[in-house]
Amino acid sequence: MSILGLKKKQPKTFKVKVITMDAEMEFSCEVKWKGKDLFDLVCRTVGLRETWFFGLRYTVKDTYAWLKPDKRVLDQEVPKDSPITFHFLAKFFPEKVEEELVQEITQHLFFLQVKKQILDEEIFCSPEASVLLASYAVQAKYGDYDPNFHKPGFLSQDELLPKRVLMQYQMTADMWEEKITAWYAEHRGIARDEAEMEYLKIAQDLEMYGVSYFAITQNKRDTDLLLGVDAQGLHIYSPNSKLNPNKSFPWSGIRNISYSEKEFTIKPLDKKKDVFKFYSSQLRVNKLILQLCIGNHDLFMRRRKVDSIEVQQMKAQAKEEKARKKMERQILAREKQMREEAERAKEEMERRLFQLQDESRLANEALLRSEETADLLAEKAQIAEEEAKLLAHKAAEAEQERQRLEVTAMKTKEEKRLMEQKMREAEQLAVKLVEQSERRLKEADHLKQDLTEAKDAERRAKQKLLEITKTTYPLIAAYSAPPAPPEAADFAYESASTRLDFKDSDMKRLSMEIERERLEYMEKSKHLQDQLKELKSEIESLKLEEQQQAGLYSLPGEARGYIQEPVYIPHSNRNSAYMSQMAFFEEV
């Protein structure tokens, strides 16, 4: 066996993994492929024609480098891993994204890369601008805002704001989502590519957009500085400030850039200005700076020239594509609007159908109820008719009753008048009886007094007669006459007794007359009391009748007051009949 047979067979291909902003791809490359061959393969796979903005970047130790197109892939300082990993990224940034980015895929790749740089805080962005950019990112991802579909919390899994912004304010995730959604709702009708373009138009005005930073030192001072390379030119920054450059060198004002090992020299176009020199510690970084300077300068000069035929064709195709997409979006919007209107009309018809069904059901129920009500009303009408007849009969009876009550009221008034007259007459009679009673009582008192005086006089006369008889009779008998016989004495005594008895009979007769008059008075008083009782019963019956007649008529207040006031008779010797008479008046 020869020595050549012992040698290992060299592989003819090697594995490559390319990571874009939204995908990962693996390729099998030939050993002899240059960087341009791999780059063209990736661009064809992605469908990218604006290749001058992009490159394949790989990591070398503590820095990164871009794959050189004119040198074999394996001859460069690429990692020896299998597969070899490259990142397909934008190497150069446009000055005006709206004018320079033609293809939609180019625009989309730039959008994804700039968005990641903002979220990773490689590009500084204020909180207000971050919220606005996040709203365009949501519009590009989710389309038009629909409150029925996009419920609260639908952004909880999306990374939309830099951590620095989230920590700067004491706000919850729901509060940030509410702010983003408020802007998001205003972007209705914007397509995905338009939302991404609006995002890039805002991002390109940020100070750190498209700037690549490198640590450098100034000549003879070893002062730490930062060099920024972008589409506008070169910028010198302080280490702690990447926003505002201390000095800038626009591409239009630079005549030449050169470096020897670690020293860089920038020669201004104006020869009166000083040459600026700076140092970089690593040769690999110096080469990267030189590549970025050459590439950005070439693009700067290219923008100021007439577009090539390829670019013009691309722009024309992109314009036609945009017009076509715009027309398609309009057609789609019209169809969507028509579909929404049709759905609304369908919903309205369904709602109307349900409403008509409900109305029909309600109408049937109402019809049944109306039939039942008609029967009920017929019965009620019959009952009402009977009630009307009854009411008419009752009205006639009521009218008769009213007329009778009017007659009764008139009679009652007349009876009241007569009763009041009787009461007045009874009262006058009572007063007369009281006066007559007083007069009789006075006469009785006088008669009693006369009787008492007469009895006293009789008693005194009898006593005096006895005294005279005792003293004079014996003398007369002795001196003037012979003694009388006993019969004569007895006759004389009987005569005197007869006179006395005559006087006693007069007294008895007088007492009998007084008693008779008293009895007559008592009889009259009793008769008057019976009349008053009868009058009281008549008054009570009238009151009861008035209450039954619904209180329409009542005894006048004057009569009531007149009856209620008792008759006062100032005399101390009132008999029992007179007292009962006054008690009856007081009760009435």
Image (cartoon, rainbow, N blue to C red):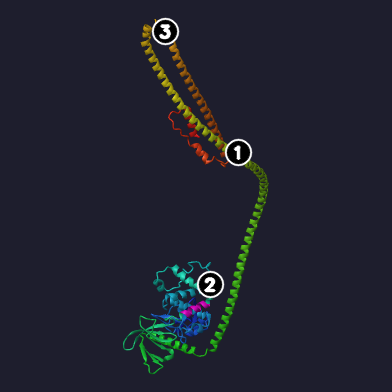
| Residue situated in front as seen by the camera: 291 or 7 | 291
Residue plotted at (48% across, 20% down): 512
Q: Type of residue at label 2?
A: Asp
Mark 2 or mark 1: name the one nearer the start of the chain.
2
Which segment is the magenta one? 193-202
Q: Which mark is residue 144?
A: 2
Judge from the rendering whether residue 371 lies leftward or rightward of residue 529; answer left or right: right
Judge from the rendering whether residue 323 lies leftward or rightward of residue 159; answer left or right: right
Q: Nearer the viewer, mark 2 or mark 3?
A: 3
| Residue situated in front as seen by the camera: 449 or 574 | 449
Q: Which mark is residue 411?
A: 1
Residue plotted at (41% across, 83% down): 212
Is residue 197 covered in magenta? yes
| SS for callout 3 | helix
Q: Position of residue 138 (x, y in %)?
A: 49, 73
**For mark 3, what is the residue?**
489
Regarding residue 106, the answer to whether it shows in the image is yes
Mark 3 or mark 1: name the one nearer the start of the chain.
1
